[in-house]
Image (cartoon, rainbow, N blue to C red):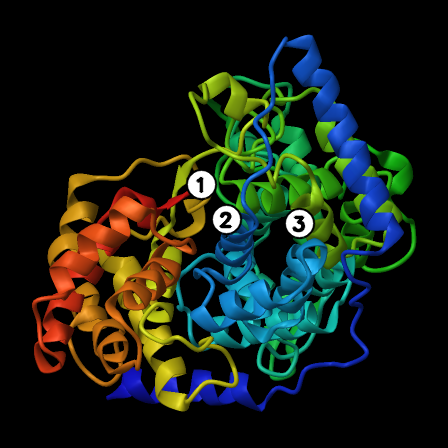
Amino acid sequence: MARLVVAIMVVLTAALVVPNEASSQRGAHDPTVARAAAAIDHHLEAAWAKAAMEPRPPAEGLLVARRMSLALTGAVPSLEEIRAFESRPQGERLEAHLDELLASRRFADYLAERLARVFVGTQEAPFLIFRRRRFVYWLSDALHQGRPYDDMVRDMVAGTGLWTDKPGVNFITAQRGEAVPLTGRSTRAFLGMRLDCAQCHDHPFSHWKQTDFMGLAAFYGGIDRNATGIIDTDEPFVPGGRMMMMGKATPTPESVAPEVPFAHEALPTDGSRRERLAAWLTSPSNPYFARAIVNRMWTLMFGRTLNRGAVDDLETPERVDGLLDVIARDFVAQGYDLRHLIRVIATTRAFRMSTEGDVTTEAQDLFAAFPMTPLRPEQIAGSLVQLSDPHTVDAESHFLWRLLRFGNTRDFARRYGDAGEDELQARITTITQRLVMMNGNIVNERIEPGLLNAAGRLARMDMDDGRRVDAAFLMAFTRRPSETERDHFVAQLAPHARKQKAAALQDMMWSLINATEFSWNH
């Protein structure tokens, strides 16, 4: 019962938020978007030519729309969205679809959860000083209002006040205000650097020293909590306990002065320690800040990093030399506008490219073909809920549908194998995951005959069996069936009278959901 009450409060809170009409929504036709996308295309084309690689042709419009929806809302497009997409002039469809997604509350909520996993993790505790849900709502509001990314980060790193009234400070309280874990979280989340490996000794595989880590940690020294929330004190930072230096125990260290390991010119002299750190982190002179979020957003949309390592390890080689800098420079020039960044990525030739034919791993690594990747658990769960309803499940949907999506996404992701903070890392589909799809209760509940699921709705629609098959394929795959596919399923449906047709439709939907095509991005 407690979980149900929390879920109801979550949905009601989202429903009460009014979209900010003044938010930055310049649209995909903005010339700055076209110029930035063209610069990326030019850089990639040079890499393809150097590798003597022929890029794949453009993908079908509906397929690209599916990619956009999965990347930005965690679900396939609804039948309603598909109908609206196809009603527009050919040359305006993708741009209009992208603009609608970025203006939606679904996008803000979905991206807020993806970023929250990076910033504060997935655990709710410690409840007395940390409110993860308040933090996610705050992120969602900021994204919906079009706040610049650097502003959000400054609020998280340098914020003061109560974690309920100033939700950004939950970034601090999630780590209990402790300097060492805050430094590890900050460098990974905001800089794409695994500097936390140097907290106990010099990094064994990189140039980072223990002094680099402790110098950054000192900026988080002196954090205190009182009745008014998070405050800063003048207390110096003294690393706790006995550190390890090159494998040898050292005496308890003295206080450490705040110091940055690079871009010293970007560190201001005025302000509190955390204000100075926030200014340094978000400075255009910091070579890692913009590149880290660019790599994360690219990976969210492509399913593949721009570097050859983990998304939070930018010191690994790039797949296409120099591409990160091309995108990051534009992101900084446009005021750290995340919507602009997403529009640019979604407008590139690489994002709209086909995966047809014999696509090699090298072609996908150089983005000469759209990389084929398995969907993440929350994308499959969101798609299962969406295909149950021809209408878009969003903030305007009936309360029960929104509650259903919240509960099903959480429960399915847990059973399917939620990777938590590491959800953007490379992964493979497991036998357990296939069994969940084939036999899981959540899947069966979405397709069994009834008033609120796919089979029941298709059976009640006033249309012939051919159109029912078309609708089912659009809902599951965002494409129409081939002639062979349509003929096969029409033959399966034809012998059944109207009352028994729902059961046959259930079997059809089960086969579509368990096809590889449903659970992969392509």
The amino acid at mark 2 is: Leu
Q: Could you tell me which secondary element the residue under label 2 belongs to?
A: helix
- Which residue is nearer to you in this view: 223 or 355? 355
> Which numbered tag is attached to residue 522?
1
Q: Is residue 202 visible?
A: no
Reply above or below: 206 against 356: above
**Which mark sits nearer the N-terminus, 3 or 2?**
2
- Which residue is nearer to you in this view: 90 or 172? 90
Q: Quadrant of the C terminus?
A: top left
Mark 1, other Cα within 10 Å: few <14 / some 14–19 / many ≥20: many
**Which mark sits nearer the N-terminus, 2 or 1?**
2
Distance between mark 3 and mark 1 Cα atoms: 50 Å
Mark 2, other Cα within 10 Å: few <14 / some 14–19 / many ≥20: some
The amino acid at mark 3 is: Phe
Dot 2 corresponds to which residue?
A: 63
Query: Mark 2 touching mark 1, by CB under 8 A?
Result: yes
> In front: mark 2 or mark 1?
2
Picture quadrant of residue 352: top right
> Which numbered tag is attached to residue 237?
3
Q: How many marks?
A: 3
